[in-house]
Image (tube, rainbow, N blue to C red):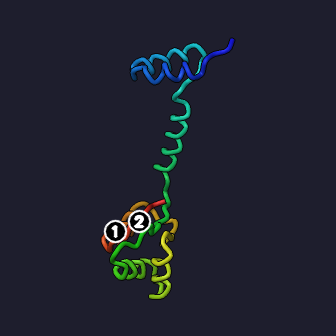
Amino acid sequence: MAFDKDAIIASLKEASILDLADLVKAIEDEFGVSAAAPVAAAGAAGDDAAAKDSFDVELTEPGQAKIGVIKAVRDATGLGLKESKDLVDGAPSVIKKDLNESDANDLKSKLEAAGATVTLK
């Protein structure tokens, strides 16, 4: 039994969202599968990230006020001026690793107040 893939795709393009939802439900029932399984797996990975207890603070972009960001990095890391400048100039770069959530958010807010763009990983 051959089917016309193009005709099926054309029919799907014309279907409403409710029709497509009914189709998905019918396919799930007919074949004993779940379209939500990949989403549930992705959700579980997100739960692991939410339960994470250590974070890396990454300087994504130094922004326009580079000098303020260099000072903030220097204060946070205890590095010298040149090393702090090299970290800022080398963005994206990890400023500190394995911080608890509170300390990571505190450092992130200090760097953002200086004008940087920061990501917690």
Q: x%, y% of residue 121?
A: 49, 59
In the picture provided, is 48 more to the left or to the right than 69? right
Disc 1 or 2, which lies upstream in sequence?
Answer: 1
Q: x%, y% of residue 113?
A: 30, 71
* Depicted 5 relative to depicted 65: above or below: above
The disc label shown at residue 112, or none: 1
The residue at which mark 2 appears reads as 118
Q: Which quarter of the rendered picture does the N terminus lie within?
A: top right
Disc 2 residue type (three-letter): Val
Mark 2: few/some/many CA within 10 Å (<14, 14-19, 20+): many
Instruction: Kindly state the secondary structure of the residue where label 1 is placed.
Output: helix
Q: What's the residue at 40%, 81% (across, down)? A: 70
Q: Are dots 1 and 2 in contact, CB under 8 Å?
A: yes
* Depicted 64 relative to depicted 18: above or below: below
* Depicted 98 relative to depicted 14: above or below: below
Q: What's the residue at 34%, 75% (across, down)? A: 64
Q: x%, y% of residue 79?
A: 48, 84
- Residue 118 shows up from this direction: yes
Going by the picture, which residue comes out furthest to the bottom? 81
Mark 1: few/some/many CA within 10 Å (<14, 14-19, 20+): some
- Residue 96 shows up from this direction: no
Q: What's the residue at 45%, 67% (across, down)? A: 60
Q: CA distance from mark 1 to mark 2?
A: 7 Å
Disc 1 residue type (three-letter): Glu
